Amino acid sequence: MQLLSNGRFKNADHQAVVNSECSRLSIATFQNPTPDATVYLMAVRDGEAPILDQSITFAEMYRRKMARDIELAKLKKQAKAEKRLQKSAKEFAAPNANKFTVPTAKEFAVPNANKPLDDILA
């Protein structure tokens, strides 16, 4: 819809949401012209910026849409993974906050560091 309307109407992000209070009705529509069919764009109004400046084939329009959908799916998946990681880090940090401390320089010190190597190995 976004390409056909030349950017005037935005594509809806299709995501089914379960609702236990009422049933859902889905209506499928099929628009499948031949791949080489020309898709003519809706004229833009004064002040609107077109997203395309010329007509394209249906195959090209479909390719662009699918590329956009795949990119959005990747971004959503990445955002969910980052959110889960942040949640896990918070859940781990809260009960373990007092268990971990930063070691002091003395704890990192190498024993016998001032002795010659031959004396240490003897």
Image (cartoon, grey):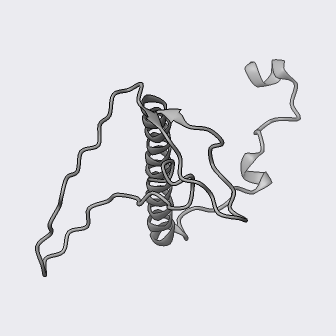
Q: Horizontally, is 2 left or right of 22 in the view?
A: right
Compared to residue 91, the image places residue 110 above or below, namely above
Q: Position of residue 76 (x, y in %)?
A: 46, 52
Image position, residue 15 (x, y; %): 32, 59
Task: Tell me what residue is drawn at x 81 percent, y 23 percent.
Answer: 119
Instruction: Determine whether 41 is above or below 19 in the image.
Output: above
In the rendered image, the quadrant that contains the C terminus is top right
2 or 67, which lies in front? 2
Percent x, y of residue 41: 53, 46
Residue that appears at 15% across and 69% down: 24
Q: Residue at x 48, y 60 (%)?
A: 83
Tell me which residue sits at (50%, 60%) in the image: 10
Q: Is residue 84 above or below residue 20?
A: above
In this view of the protein, which residue sits in the foreground, 65 or 31? 31
Residue 106 is left or right of residue 56, and the answer is: right
Q: Give residue 75's position: percent from left, percent from top.
A: 51, 49
How many tags in the picture?
Answer: 0
